[in-house]
Image (spheres, helix red, strand yellow):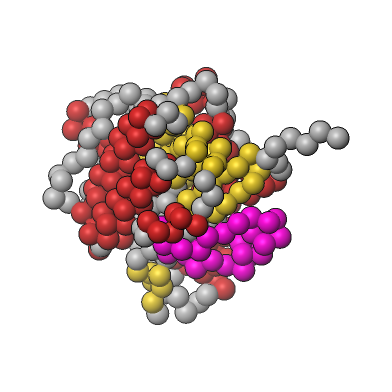
Amino acid sequence: MFYMKKRKVFILGGGGFIGSSIVKILNNRGNYDITVGDNFIHNQIDEELKNFYKRNDIKLIYEDFTDFSQFQKLDKEYDDFYMLASMIGVNYTLENPHEVIRVNTALIYNSLEWIKKVKLKNVLFTSTSECYSGTIDKFNYKIPTDEGIPLCIEDIHHPRWTYAATKILGESGFLNYSKKYSINCKIIRYNNIIGPKMGFGHIIPHLVERFLKNENPFKIYGANQTRSFCYVDDGALGTIQAMECQNANSDIFHIGNDVEISIENFVKTTGKYFNFKGTYEFAPTYPGSVSRRCPDLSKSRKILGFKINYSWEQALILTLNWYKDFFLKNPNIKCFQGPNKFYK
């Protein structure tokens, strides 16, 4: 009997929001040998995920990979290396920009030094549309935005841009190291991926908490700004498509949804979900927030076969369902601080 060799995969950040979705998709497909590296700083590993790893024989290295010695626990050969690990969250960047720089830079550098020492076919680094947020607002580039846009952030003094600065570093680092060491490399730039367990430093948990508290009038911050929201399952599948695409190398792909909506529309759609009968009031935008964001998906569709299976409305409802249930089951949680850390 013929047995196909399993595709050997290491996913750094595989316990996170998008990473765990990638793990589950690969596991459901079968024929993958999966190793996950994560210290779960964004959220403590829950029993459901822990049992999933154990039940499916997924190797977990529960360590902090800002310490290079943790890479020594890995094997010497992999087919695919997904590099998703990073410190993220607008609130966290504003409060702890030094930690964002320290953690993300260490993860990037350690990963780059590791890929020099192992036998590796493919690497994928996950980046963000934040990398060109300054280009959109300052130089009036067209929307939807393609992958060829120059990377530019706004005021370098502002802690808001520490995350984007590290992602620009990562893009350059992985593209150039991969070329030097003959590894097939892809870069993914995510555009507003949403879904259950996405964290608590984002717009949707903010909205859920406020609607459950019956805020009235309900303030809409940055009502005229636009975003394009993509469900996590679509984002994870697109990431896998990019990793396994044989017709791409040193390529950058947008993964997201190309339906652009206003924050006003997004908030009021959420209000309908909560049967909100009060009034709305426009409020100033969030510090450092960009005016518009919408990706051009032409390249991802043509080369990867990427498609959107969930509309932004479906993605929103699925995400709201999870956060509403969470807050109702945890009534003593009044607010949050840092990456998914609550205080009462």
Q: Is residue 107 positioned above or below 141 on the image? A: below
At 60% from the left and 42% from the top, the residue drawn is: 8
Closer to the camera in the image, 172 or 203 = 172
Residue positioned most to the right: 1
Indicate the position of residue 108 as horizontal and vertical percent values: 34, 47
**Would residue 97 be found to the left or right of residue 209 on screen?**
left
**Would residue 220 be found to the left or right of residue 302 on screen?**
left
Q: Quadrant of residue 234?
A: top right
**Magenta stretch encompasses residue 286:** no
**Magenta stretch encompasses residue 62:** yes
Q: Looking at the figure, which quarter contains the C terminus?
A: bottom left
At 13% from the left and 50% from the top, the residue drawn is: 157
Closer to the camera in the image, 285 or 192 = 192
At 46% from the left and 29% from the top, the residue drawn is: 184
Indicate the position of residue 154 as horizontal and vertical percent values: 18, 41
At 28% from the left and 46% from the top, the residue drawn is: 166
Tell me if residue 252 can be seen.
no
Closer to the camera in the image, 298 or 76 = 76
Question: Number of marks in the image?
Answer: 0
Q: Is residue 76 positioned above or below 278 on the image? A: above
Tell me if residue 4 can be seen.
yes
Q: The magenta stretch spans which residues?
A: 39-65
Q: Quadrant of residue 6?
A: top right
Q: Is residue 44 positioned above or below 102 on the image? A: below
Q: Is residue 83 positioned above or below 94 on the image? A: above
Indicate the position of residue 165 as horizontal and vertical percent values: 25, 44
Closer to the camera in the image, 116 or 307 = 116
Q: Quadrant of residue 334?
A: bottom left
**Would residue 92 be found to the left or right of residue 85 on screen?**
left
Indicate the position of residue 188 as horizontal and vertical percent values: 43, 36
Q: Looking at the figure, which quarter contains the N terminus?
A: top right
